[in-house]
Amino acid sequence: DGGITQSPKYLFRKEGQNVTLSCEQNLNHDAMYWYRQDPGQGLRLIYYSQIVNDFQKGDIAEGYSVSREKKESFPLTVTSAQKNPTAFYLCASSPDPGELFFGEGSRLTVL
Amino acid sequence: AQKVTQAQTEISVVEKEDVTLDCVYETRDTTYYLFWYKQPPSGELVFLIRRNSFDEQNEISGRYSWNFQKSTSSFNFTITASQVVDSAVYFCALSEAGNTPLVFGKGTRLSVIA
């Protein structure tokens, strides 16, 4: 099946630990995105990549890092520098301007 | 700068009622795209519609319809004869020309009660 696969679906982390969220797509899309969703806040852009080996910061990039070594993969690392990491994280890809295809999301909880 | 405002945080309707979700946007570009997405309880966002700024025709798809008015910078979404399965969070989004990432509104949570 074609689509976006995010893993893990649920993740618990202790304060001070880094954690990496996986995002893989087999849609052959050039662009990939990471959004963060908090209750009542909508979706806010963390990082995006329009081509392999290149990525740009979004509105809330502090405390996060990404890599784009392969077209299919765009992992997000939530570092210990992120002060409030508990949230729902959504990965998406896009073949052209705007229309995003989303994964099922990863819910991160910091204990 | 681009901005999307969904003033309605939560709406509750009884099944079979019609409901309109409001979306107001801001952009300085003359070329842009507007979107609606649905987020059911499972969490995954589902694409509903894309409109470009040069196409002001209203769109109807089954029980769903969209009213795009550039004069008021609005792109409202109406569900006719709502059903329980329509219960979800609905997001309006905007992308300016040049392949910029989508900017989302804060969403409207719709609850349809049987």
Image: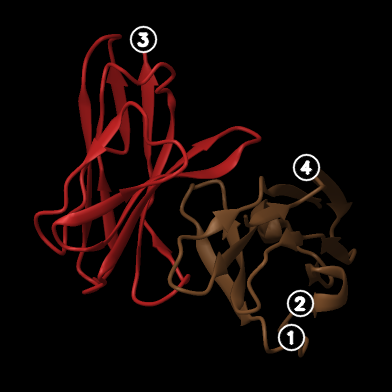
Chain colours: A red, B brown
Give the chain letter at badge 1.
Answer: B
Q: Which residue is mark 2?
A: B66
| Alpha carbons under labels 3 and 4: distance apart | 29 Å
Q: Position of residue A19 (x, y in %)?
A: 22, 26
| Alpha carbons under labels 2 and 4: distance apart | 19 Å
| Alpha carbons under labels 3 and 2: distance apart | 43 Å
Q: Position of residue B73 (x, y in %)?
A: 80, 68
The residue under label 2 is which amino acid type?
A: Trp
Q: Between A62 and B76, which is closer to the camera in this rendering?
A: A62
> Which secondary structure lies at badge 2?
strand
Q: Which residue is mark 1?
A: B60
Are the numbered discs 3 and 1 placed on the same chain, yes or no?
no
The residue under label 3 is which amino acid type?
A: Leu
Residue occupying the point 53% across, 68% down: B47
Q: Which residue is mark 4?
A: B9
| Alpha carbons under labels 4 and 1: distance apart | 24 Å
Are the numbered discs 4 and 1 placed on the same chain, yes or no?
yes
* Whether label 2 touches label 4, CB < 8 Å: no
The residue under label 1 is which amino acid type?
A: Ile
